[in-house]
Amino acid sequence: DAKTTQPPSMDCAEGRAANLPCNHSTISGNEYVYWYRQIHSQGPQYIIHGLKNNETNEMASLIITEDRKSSTLILPHATLRDTAVYYCIVSLRAETSYDKVIFGPGTSLSVIP
Amino acid sequence: DAGVTQSPTHLIKTRGQQVTLRCSPKSGHDTVSWYQQALGQGPQFIFQYYEEEERQRGNFPDRFSGHQFPNYSSELNVNALLLGDSALYLCASRLGGIPPYEQYFGPGTRLTVT
């Protein structure tokens, strides 16, 4: 079962920041938080990952709380092309260097003109 | 373009038949995972291959099997197809080694079982 909890859907006005929350209260110290998104009828696309510190790349920013029990993905200026299902994933480490990526239902983000 | 390719794009099969789906990983990637995605749900992990061996497996029956070739490409085989096997089958590849891992997904194969 997924170890994360996300709201099923969110709306965001075009040009505004989209803030997508994720709860992962049972995360362990050696597990990363990953975000992927899936645009309709396409394969999921990697967005960003983090362990403890906040991270930023050309697509988004990831804010992880100090206790690591939750995180927020931020799309700074949402466009219509950001309409997608966003998945927050905590990697399950069965053994060293092995992982079993478990997807939950994700958050369906609708960017509104 | 993630560089992961899958074939075929679409496939229609009849209950009880067998199907083989194919995946070519992104250049340089040695680890391939397969996922099943039913309509309206998130992808469900089937299994992962590394060094031509199945390393991890999700909660799928033995009807689902796979193979990885020396060039790292992979096949997913499903025997005795059921209507419930209708789904989008996704292949993802990544580099081995230590985390963190960035997986690249292919466009998927849409399987319809009638």
Image: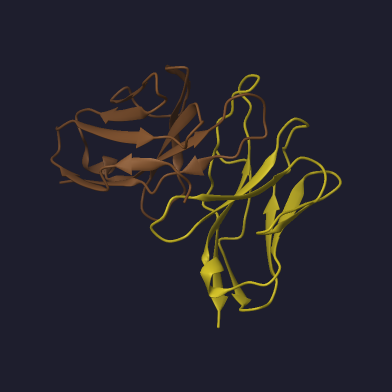
Chain colours: A yellow, B brown
Query: Which residue of the protein is positioned furthest toward the bottom in this rendering?
Result: A113
Q: Position of residue B27 (x, y in %)?
A: 47, 35
Q: Position of residue B91 (x, y in %)?
A: 41, 38
Seen from the viewer's position, the closer of residues A64 and A54 is A54
Which quarter of the figure has residue A14? bottom right
Q: Residue at x 77, y 45 (%)?
A: A69
Number of marks in picture: 0
Q: Is residue B57 left or right of residue A61?
A: left
Which quarter of the figure has residue B74? top left
Which quarter of the figure has residue B5? top left
Seen in the picture, residue B5 relative to A43 is either above or below; the reply is above
Q: Is residue B24 left or right of residue A75?
A: left
Q: Residue at x 61, y 60 (%)?
A: A7
Q: Position of residue B61 (x, y in %)?
A: 34, 26
Query: Which residue of the protein is positioned furthest toward the right in this rendering?
Result: A66
Q: Position of residue A103 (x, y in %)?
A: 53, 44
Seen in the picture, residue B51 relative to B35 is either above or below; the reply is above
Seen from the viewer's position, the closer of residues A33 and B103 is B103
Q: Is residue A15 left or right of residue A69?
A: left
Query: Which residue of the protein is positioned furthest toward the front in this rendering?
Result: B27
